[in-house]
Image (cartoon, rainbow, N blue to C red):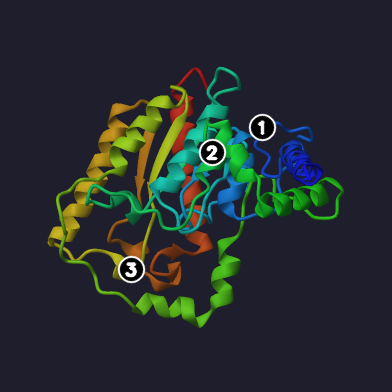
Amino acid sequence: MWLYPVACLAAAAVTLILILAIDPYDTGRFSLIDGYGVPAFGQRLTAASLARAPDTEAAIIGNSTIQLLDPARLLEQTGWHFVSLAMTLSGPPEQLPVARWLIRHHDGKSAPPLKALIIGLDKTWCQSDGKLDELEPFPSWLYSNDAIDYVSAMFNMRGVDAAVHKIKVVLGLEPPLRADGYRNLELLLAGDGPKVAADLNKGVRPVDAAGPPDFAAVPLLRDLLRSAPNTTIVVLVFVPHFISDFPMPGTPAERRLDLCKGAYRDIAAERERTVVLDYLKDDEMTNDRRNFWDRGHYRMPIAKLIEKDISAAMLKVAGADPRH
């Protein structure tokens, strides 16, 4: 009678060991087949691989409002190898753990220091009720320092399925994710066609500002940047939205937004090699419907403009710093 449960336990142990050795999410933990990248899983599951890659020199972090920035174009403009760690439907609770993982693997001690970090700031970074809402489930175990959390999370059918996909990548039967993590958001938005365009006509511009101006993400970002190498150039980008998504002028909502922007400018003022670029303002760009797919997503020409501004700002900082 005891042979069956022992056999089951042995099979389970072998399965777990194989999953960990295959390392489907390319975390570098327990891996025996490193260097093949990661299958094209969801963005929350691929960032661990992209962020730890040894040739990663710089990164883009944010949600879909920063996803159009192309690491390849930034490489052309700066000479630095960027990866896109953008995750749709995410905010600080998801993006900060990924940023910590990135910095942990490019801390200037065990690996060369991260050269640059671009963080897209949207309304999720200005949540002002002292809380941070997680928009979709996030695999915190994947970015945790706790090996037990990681191992226990891998031992399920999801882990088995992920391992199968990784084996297909190793055998050349399935293409890996693009090495810099870029996924062209415009292809998805264009596929939605009229539904996306109709969003430009929706919405009521905010007037009220509920609760005290307690921006919970601000101290968390400040703490993150303290852990980054001193030489890392940080660019905080207030991403553009269409004007119908802006607070009404002269209202508490507009003043709340100004306070939020001021809080992040304070972070930039406190830290050397940190720059703020603000596109979230009432100007010609944000009033032109042709620049946007919907209220929160700009088109490719605007992405290219932002990339050039970011590159110019980073190179200006790097040129003024003899360590770059």
Sequence-wise first label, 3 or 1:
1
Tag of residue 70: none
Residue 169 seen anywhere in this rendered image of the structure? yes
Residue at image position (52%, 31%) is 145
Q: Secondary structure at mark 3?
A: helix
Q: Which residue is mark 2?
A: 143
- Kindly identify the amino acid type of the residue bearing the numbered disc 3: Asn
Q: Secondary structure at mark 1?
A: loop
- Kindly identify the amino acid type of the residue bearing the numbered disc 2: Tyr
* Label 1 crowd bin: few (<14), some (14–19), many (20+), radius 10 Å: some
Q: Is residue 71 above or below residue 106?
A: below
In the picture, measured across the screen, residue 240 lies left or right of residue 154, that is left
In the picture, measured across the screen, residue 218 lies left or right of residue 150, that is left
* Label 3 crowd bin: few (<14), some (14–19), many (20+), radius 10 Å: some
Tag of residue 29: 1
Residue 230 % position (x, y): 43, 22
The image quadrant that residue 142 belongs to is top right
Residue 82 seen anywhere in this rendered image of the structure? no
Residue 278 % position (x, y): 33, 49
User: Marks 3 and 2: in contact by CB < 8 Å?
Assistant: no
Sequence-wise first label, 2 or 3:
2
Question: Considering depth in this image, is 104 or 133 the residue closer to the camera?
Answer: 133
Residue at image position (43%, 71%) is 294
Q: How many marks?
A: 3
Q: Which residue is mark 3?
A: 287
